[in-house]
Amino acid sequence: MSERKLRVLSIGAHPDDADTSAGGLLAKLRDKGWEIRLLSVTDGSAGTYRKELGGQPLNLIRQAEAAASGRLLGGRYDVLDHPDGRLEVTLDIREELIRYIRRFSPDLILTNRPNDYHADHRNTAQLVQDASFLLTVPCICADTPYMEHMPVVLYWHDSFKKPYPCQPDIIVPIDDTLEELVQMACCHESQYFDWMYWPDHTERIDWPKEQKVAHLRDRFDRLFAGHRRQYDAQVRAKFGAEADSIGHVEVYEISEYGEEPSQAFMDMLER
Protein backbone atom coordinates (compact mmCIF):
# COMPACT_ATOMS: atom_id res chain seq x y z
CA MET A 1 0.00 0.00 0.00
CA SER A 2 1.49 3.35 -1.05
CA GLU A 3 2.21 5.94 1.62
CA ARG A 4 -0.04 9.03 1.58
CA LYS A 5 1.56 12.12 0.06
CA LEU A 6 2.12 15.12 2.29
CA ARG A 7 -0.27 17.93 1.38
CA VAL A 8 0.01 21.71 1.41
CA LEU A 9 -2.90 24.13 1.04
CA SER A 10 -2.10 27.76 0.24
CA ILE A 11 -5.04 30.07 1.00
CA GLY A 12 -5.17 33.61 -0.35
CA ALA A 13 -7.82 36.29 -0.59
CA HIS A 14 -7.52 36.75 -4.37
CA PRO A 15 -6.65 34.52 -7.36
CA ASP A 16 -2.98 35.54 -7.42
CA ASP A 17 -2.19 35.56 -3.70
CA ALA A 18 -1.83 31.89 -2.83
CA ASP A 19 0.77 31.18 -5.51
CA THR A 20 2.82 34.35 -5.91
CA SER A 21 3.12 34.89 -2.14
CA ALA A 22 4.54 31.42 -1.53
CA GLY A 23 5.46 30.03 -4.93
CA GLY A 24 9.11 29.34 -4.20
CA LEU A 25 8.25 27.05 -1.29
CA LEU A 26 5.30 25.49 -3.13
CA ALA A 27 7.52 24.56 -6.09
CA LYS A 28 10.10 23.01 -3.78
CA LEU A 29 7.45 20.97 -1.98
CA ARG A 30 5.99 19.80 -5.30
CA ASP A 31 9.48 18.62 -6.31
CA LYS A 32 9.68 16.71 -3.02
CA GLY A 33 6.46 14.87 -3.88
CA TRP A 34 3.91 16.91 -1.92
CA GLU A 35 0.36 17.34 -3.23
CA ILE A 36 -0.32 21.02 -3.92
CA ARG A 37 -3.66 22.80 -3.55
CA LEU A 38 -4.35 26.53 -3.89
CA LEU A 39 -7.45 28.46 -2.86
CA SER A 40 -8.72 32.00 -3.41
CA VAL A 41 -11.47 32.92 -0.96
CA THR A 42 -12.83 35.74 -3.16
CA ASP A 43 -13.69 35.74 -6.85
CA GLY A 44 -11.18 38.44 -7.83
CA SER A 45 -13.87 40.33 -9.72
CA ALA A 46 -12.87 43.85 -8.62
CA GLY A 47 -9.16 43.83 -9.51
CA THR A 48 -9.30 46.15 -12.51
CA TYR A 49 -9.69 49.81 -13.44
CA ARG A 50 -11.52 48.71 -16.61
CA LYS A 51 -15.15 49.03 -15.57
CA GLU A 52 -16.36 46.95 -18.51
CA LEU A 53 -14.37 44.00 -17.11
CA GLY A 54 -15.44 44.31 -13.48
CA GLY A 55 -17.63 41.53 -12.12
CA GLN A 56 -18.24 38.24 -13.92
CA PRO A 57 -16.03 38.92 -16.98
CA LEU A 58 -12.97 39.47 -14.77
CA ASN A 59 -13.91 36.58 -12.51
CA LEU A 60 -13.77 34.21 -15.50
CA ILE A 61 -10.44 35.66 -16.63
CA ARG A 62 -8.94 35.28 -13.18
CA GLN A 63 -10.21 31.73 -12.77
CA ALA A 64 -8.41 30.81 -16.01
CA GLU A 65 -5.24 32.62 -14.89
CA ALA A 66 -5.30 30.83 -11.53
CA ALA A 67 -5.81 27.47 -13.21
CA ALA A 68 -2.78 28.10 -15.43
CA SER A 69 -0.61 28.91 -12.44
CA GLY A 70 -1.92 25.85 -10.60
CA ARG A 71 -0.88 23.66 -13.53
CA LEU A 72 2.68 24.93 -13.20
CA LEU A 73 2.63 23.59 -9.65
CA GLY A 74 0.90 20.37 -10.65
CA GLY A 75 -2.03 21.24 -8.41
CA ARG A 76 -5.58 22.52 -8.39
CA TYR A 77 -6.37 26.21 -7.90
CA ASP A 78 -9.92 26.77 -6.63
CA VAL A 79 -11.66 30.15 -6.62
CA LEU A 80 -14.65 30.66 -4.30
CA ASP A 81 -17.50 32.99 -5.22
CA HIS A 82 -17.31 35.60 -2.44
CA PRO A 83 -17.20 39.13 -3.90
CA ASP A 84 -13.74 40.67 -4.22
CA GLY A 85 -13.35 43.67 -1.90
CA ARG A 86 -16.33 42.70 0.24
CA LEU A 87 -15.15 39.61 2.12
CA GLU A 88 -16.56 39.42 5.63
CA VAL A 89 -15.75 37.16 8.56
CA THR A 90 -19.01 35.24 8.86
CA LEU A 91 -20.05 31.94 10.35
CA ASP A 92 -21.16 30.66 6.95
CA ILE A 93 -17.79 31.33 5.31
CA ARG A 94 -15.93 29.95 8.32
CA GLU A 95 -17.86 26.68 8.05
CA GLU A 96 -17.37 26.61 4.27
CA LEU A 97 -13.63 26.88 4.89
CA ILE A 98 -13.72 24.20 7.62
CA ARG A 99 -15.37 21.77 5.21
CA TYR A 100 -13.00 22.65 2.39
CA ILE A 101 -9.88 22.18 4.54
CA ARG A 102 -11.17 18.93 6.02
CA ARG A 103 -11.87 17.46 2.57
CA PHE A 104 -8.31 18.15 1.42
CA SER A 105 -6.80 17.37 4.86
CA PRO A 106 -3.52 19.29 4.50
CA ASP A 107 -0.44 18.82 6.63
CA LEU A 108 0.49 22.47 6.07
CA ILE A 109 -1.54 25.63 5.44
CA LEU A 110 0.03 28.83 4.10
CA THR A 111 -1.78 32.17 4.30
CA ASN A 112 -1.23 35.87 4.99
CA ARG A 113 -0.87 37.47 8.39
CA PRO A 114 -3.88 39.16 10.05
CA ASN A 115 -2.34 42.65 9.90
CA ASP A 116 -2.46 43.86 6.30
CA TYR A 117 -3.52 46.85 4.22
CA HIS A 118 -6.36 44.97 2.47
CA ALA A 119 -9.54 44.02 4.32
CA ASP A 120 -9.88 40.85 2.21
CA HIS A 121 -6.39 39.76 3.28
CA ARG A 122 -7.05 40.47 6.95
CA ASN A 123 -10.38 38.68 6.85
CA THR A 124 -8.93 35.65 5.08
CA ALA A 125 -6.34 35.30 7.83
CA GLN A 126 -9.06 35.69 10.47
CA LEU A 127 -11.20 33.02 8.80
CA VAL A 128 -8.25 30.60 8.73
CA GLN A 129 -7.53 31.33 12.40
CA ASP A 130 -11.15 30.83 13.39
CA ALA A 131 -11.34 27.57 11.46
CA SER A 132 -8.08 26.05 12.67
CA PHE A 133 -9.02 24.51 16.04
CA LEU A 134 -12.52 23.67 14.86
CA LEU A 135 -11.07 21.41 12.15
CA THR A 136 -10.67 18.81 14.89
CA VAL A 137 -14.04 19.26 16.64
CA PRO A 138 -16.41 16.42 15.59
CA CYS A 139 -19.65 18.26 16.40
CA ILE A 140 -18.75 21.26 14.23
CA CYS A 141 -19.71 20.74 10.56
CA ALA A 142 -20.52 17.14 11.48
CA ASP A 143 -21.41 16.33 7.87
CA THR A 144 -17.69 16.46 6.96
CA PRO A 145 -15.23 14.09 8.69
CA TYR A 146 -13.11 15.96 11.23
CA MET A 147 -9.32 16.05 11.21
CA GLU A 148 -7.48 14.28 14.00
CA HIS A 149 -4.75 16.93 14.15
CA MET A 150 -4.62 20.57 13.19
CA PRO A 151 -2.24 21.26 10.30
CA VAL A 152 0.81 23.45 10.72
CA VAL A 153 -0.11 27.01 9.72
CA LEU A 154 2.49 29.45 8.36
CA TYR A 155 2.08 33.10 7.41
CA TRP A 156 3.96 34.32 4.37
CA HIS A 157 6.08 37.45 4.70
CA ASP A 158 4.87 41.04 4.66
CA SER A 159 6.49 44.35 5.55
CA PHE A 160 3.95 45.65 8.07
CA LYS A 161 5.43 46.66 11.43
CA LYS A 162 2.32 47.17 13.57
CA PRO A 163 1.30 45.59 15.85
CA TYR A 164 4.55 43.63 15.29
CA PRO A 165 6.74 42.77 12.28
CA CYS A 166 6.85 39.38 10.61
CA GLN A 167 8.86 36.85 12.59
CA PRO A 168 11.40 34.92 10.43
CA ASP A 169 10.70 31.45 11.88
CA ILE A 170 11.09 29.56 8.59
CA ILE A 171 13.55 30.67 5.90
CA VAL A 172 13.42 28.93 2.54
CA PRO A 173 16.18 29.44 -0.06
CA ILE A 174 14.47 29.85 -3.45
CA ASP A 175 17.30 30.48 -5.91
CA ASP A 176 16.33 27.27 -7.71
CA THR A 177 12.60 28.10 -7.91
CA LEU A 178 12.65 31.90 -8.35
CA GLU A 179 12.19 31.75 -12.12
CA GLU A 180 9.22 29.41 -11.71
CA LEU A 181 7.72 31.90 -9.25
CA VAL A 182 8.07 34.59 -11.92
CA GLN A 183 6.26 32.34 -14.39
CA MET A 184 3.41 31.85 -11.91
CA ALA A 185 3.03 35.61 -11.67
CA CYS A 186 3.11 35.87 -15.47
CA CYS A 187 0.02 33.65 -15.60
CA HIS A 188 -1.90 36.48 -13.92
CA GLU A 189 -1.68 38.90 -16.84
CA SER A 190 -4.78 40.87 -15.80
CA GLN A 191 -2.99 41.74 -12.57
CA TYR A 192 0.76 41.92 -13.11
CA PHE A 193 0.66 43.34 -16.63
CA ASP A 194 -2.31 45.68 -16.30
CA TRP A 195 -3.96 46.37 -12.92
CA MET A 196 -0.64 46.70 -11.07
CA TYR A 197 0.39 49.61 -13.34
CA TRP A 198 -2.66 51.70 -12.45
CA PRO A 199 -2.73 54.60 -11.62
CA ASP A 200 0.95 55.53 -11.24
CA HIS A 201 2.60 53.75 -14.18
CA THR A 202 -0.04 53.51 -16.89
CA GLU A 203 2.64 54.03 -19.54
CA ARG A 204 3.79 50.47 -18.85
CA ILE A 205 0.47 48.98 -19.96
CA ASP A 206 1.56 49.36 -23.59
CA TRP A 207 5.00 47.85 -23.09
CA PRO A 208 5.71 44.69 -25.13
CA LYS A 209 5.06 41.56 -23.11
CA GLU A 210 8.76 40.69 -23.10
CA GLN A 211 9.51 44.00 -21.40
CA LYS A 212 6.77 43.44 -18.83
CA VAL A 213 8.14 39.98 -18.02
CA ALA A 214 11.68 41.34 -17.66
CA HIS A 215 10.43 44.10 -15.36
CA LEU A 216 8.51 41.57 -13.26
CA ARG A 217 11.55 39.29 -13.05
CA ASP A 218 13.65 42.22 -11.82
CA ARG A 219 10.96 43.11 -9.27
CA PHE A 220 10.91 39.59 -7.82
CA ASP A 221 14.71 39.38 -7.88
CA ARG A 222 14.97 42.58 -5.83
CA LEU A 223 12.19 41.54 -3.43
CA PHE A 224 13.59 38.16 -2.46
CA ALA A 225 17.21 39.30 -2.53
CA GLY A 226 16.06 42.03 -0.15
CA HIS A 227 14.65 39.40 2.21
CA ARG A 228 18.01 37.61 2.08
CA ARG A 229 19.84 40.78 3.12
CA GLN A 230 17.25 41.74 5.75
CA TYR A 231 17.48 38.37 7.49
CA ASP A 232 21.19 37.76 6.96
CA ALA A 233 21.82 36.87 10.61
CA GLN A 234 19.03 34.30 10.63
CA VAL A 235 20.16 32.81 7.30
CA ARG A 236 23.70 32.40 8.61
CA ALA A 237 22.48 30.88 11.87
CA LYS A 238 20.34 28.33 10.00
CA PHE A 239 22.57 27.47 7.05
CA GLY A 240 26.11 28.12 8.28
CA ALA A 241 28.71 27.84 5.53
CA GLU A 242 25.97 27.41 2.92
CA ALA A 243 24.69 30.94 3.57
CA ASP A 244 27.15 32.58 1.17
CA SER A 245 25.65 30.66 -1.75
CA ILE A 246 22.05 31.71 -0.93
CA GLY A 247 20.85 34.78 -2.82
CA HIS A 248 17.06 34.76 -2.47
CA VAL A 249 14.77 33.56 0.33
CA GLU A 250 11.10 33.36 1.25
CA VAL A 251 10.30 33.99 4.90
CA TYR A 252 7.46 32.52 6.94
CA GLU A 253 6.09 33.06 10.44
CA ILE A 254 4.66 30.16 12.44
CA SER A 255 1.04 30.73 13.45
CA GLU A 256 0.17 29.72 16.99
CA TYR A 257 -3.28 28.75 15.73
CA GLY A 258 -1.94 25.66 13.99
CA GLU A 259 -0.02 22.64 15.21
CA GLU A 260 3.48 23.46 16.41
CA PRO A 261 5.90 22.15 13.78
CA SER A 262 8.64 19.79 14.85
CA GLN A 263 12.25 20.60 14.07
CA ALA A 264 12.23 17.79 11.51
CA PHE A 265 9.18 19.33 9.81
CA MET A 266 10.85 22.74 9.72
CA ASP A 267 14.04 21.25 8.30
CA MET A 268 11.97 19.57 5.58
CA LEU A 269 10.59 22.95 4.52
CA GLU A 270 13.87 24.83 4.64
CA ARG A 271 16.18 22.30 3.01
Image: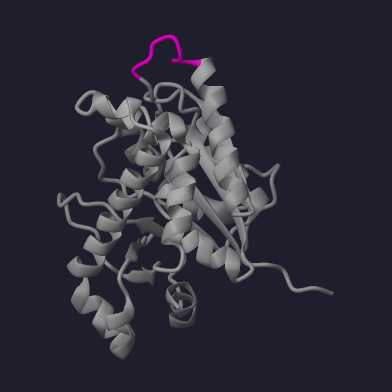
Choose between 101 and 135: the one closer to the eye. 101
Tell me: residue 173, above or below residue 45.
below
Which residue is rendered at x = 44% and y = 15% of the image? 54
User: Does residue 248 belong to the magenta stretch?
Assistant: no
The magenta segment? 49-55
Residue 156 against residue 83 in the figure, above or below: below
Residue lying farthest left? 162
**Image quarter in which the N terminus is found:** bottom right
Determine the image quadrant of residue 80.
top right
Residue 241 shows in the view = yes
Q: In the rendered view of the protein, which quadrant contains the C terminus? A: bottom left
Residue appearing at x 48%, y 15% in the figure: 55
Q: What colour-coding does the image apply? A: one colour
The residue sitting at the bottom extreme is 241
The image shows residue 74 at horizontal and vertical percentages of 64, 54
Residue at 63% in and 56% down: 105
Relative to 160, is 13 on the left or the right? Answer: right
